[in-house]
Amino acid sequence: MSEDVGVPRPNPKVALIANPAAGGGKTSDLLPRVEERLRGLGLAVETLRTDGLAHGRELAVLAHRRGELPVVLSGDGLVGAVAAALSYEPGATMGVLPGGRGNDFARVAGIPLDALEACATIRDGVAVPFDLGEGNGERFLGIASFGFDSDANTLANAAPRWLGALAYPYAALRALLGWKHARYTVDVDGDRRTFSGWSVGAANSKAYGGGMYVAPDADLHDGQLDVVLLTETSKLAFLTRVFPRVFKGTHVQLDDVHALRGREARFAADRPFVVFADGDPLGELPMTIRAIPAAIRILVPADAAPAVA
């Protein structure tokens, strides 16, 4: 952890990067009020609208190079994409205002889930280094997963916007109908496992899918990944015994769930799967995923900094 953790930052001009379509239109509704709140806190604000991850990354990098503070008002997909892009920029710091459906990074990092309340973090917060994961040459902030999760993510991304955070449980239940177990090979820092089952998650953070704590012991600051393996069970057992526990993270106490920890993990399966991270495709198996320690500094509330550090 760097020596400047906990030191308040000067307040440069805010480059507010917003995807108006995020959160089923939630961001569009929030945007005028967020702009007003930030200006009411004495911050200069320029709003930069984007409709895609690549454009959002570009806007963030250019803002940083102009000496501005990139602040993302959107969901975890754009937050992760901007964090990844800025991680290559020396000295970059970013802010996060939750405006999506899941907002899992904010939940784990201690940033208020109310975007208007979180605005104070942009003025008064402290910059804390966070790890990233990297797979297929692409970096991510949260959790990379595949298998059953591949099917569920595809369905969640196509779910009606009005479902909001319920899109993730909805997608999981729909994916359950046609699911057939796959066989996976996992190697975490030389610990090799082969098993049949549901899914594999390589977790930099604890939660995804709007509050599902798939890796409750993961730490955004330890330079390691928590790799969670969900082995073979019946669909009924998954639905009644495993899935309900994910929302509290107690599923890892079950015999069907195993957790490994390491800096690098190699993954393969007996059929094709797309790996998703932060809700978006990362690439196809086979894939090697590794942790990138202290890759990006993100503003968090001052009272959250000691906890996350």
Image (spheres, grey):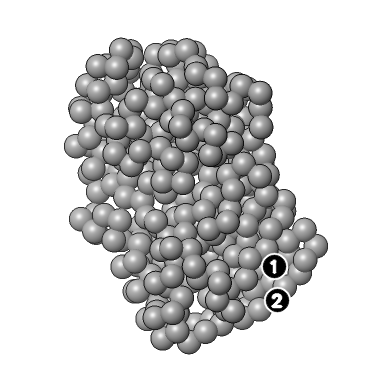
Q: Which numbered dot is residue 232?
A: none
In x, y percent, where is residue 279? 44, 53
- Mark 2: give few (<14), some (14-19) or many (20+) Cα within 10 Å: few
Residue 30, horizontal then vertical, whole percent:
22, 35
Q: Position of residue 110 (x, y in %)?
A: 43, 40
Q: Position of residue 95 (x, y in %)?
A: 43, 29
**Residue sitting nearer the eye, 52 or 205:** 205
Above or below, 247 against 123 in this view is: below
Residue at image x 61%, y 21%?
A: 4
When asked about the image quadrant of residue 22, the answer is top left
Image height of 292 relative to 246, above or below: above
Pick the front one: 133 or 276: 133
User: How many tags in the picture?
Assistant: 2
Q: CA distance from mark 2 to mark 1?
A: 6 Å
- Disc number for residue 194: 2
**Tag 2, which secondary structure?**
strand
* Front in this rendered view, residue 283 or 107: 107
Q: Is residue 266 visible?
A: no
Judge the density around disc 1: few (<14), some (14-19), many (≥20) Cα neighbours within 10 Å. many
Q: Farthest right residue?
A: 190
Residue 76 as seen in the image, left or right of residue 144: left
Which residue is depicted at the point 32% across and 45% down? 100
Secondary structure under badge 1? strand
Residue at which label 1 appears: 186
For the N terminus, the image quarter is: top right
Inspect this view and state whether residue 260 appears.
yes
Mark 2 is on which residue type? Answer: Thr
Instruction: Identify which residue is drawn at 46% across, 46% down.
Output: 108
> Type of residue at label 1?
Val
Residue depicted at x 45% and y 84%? 237
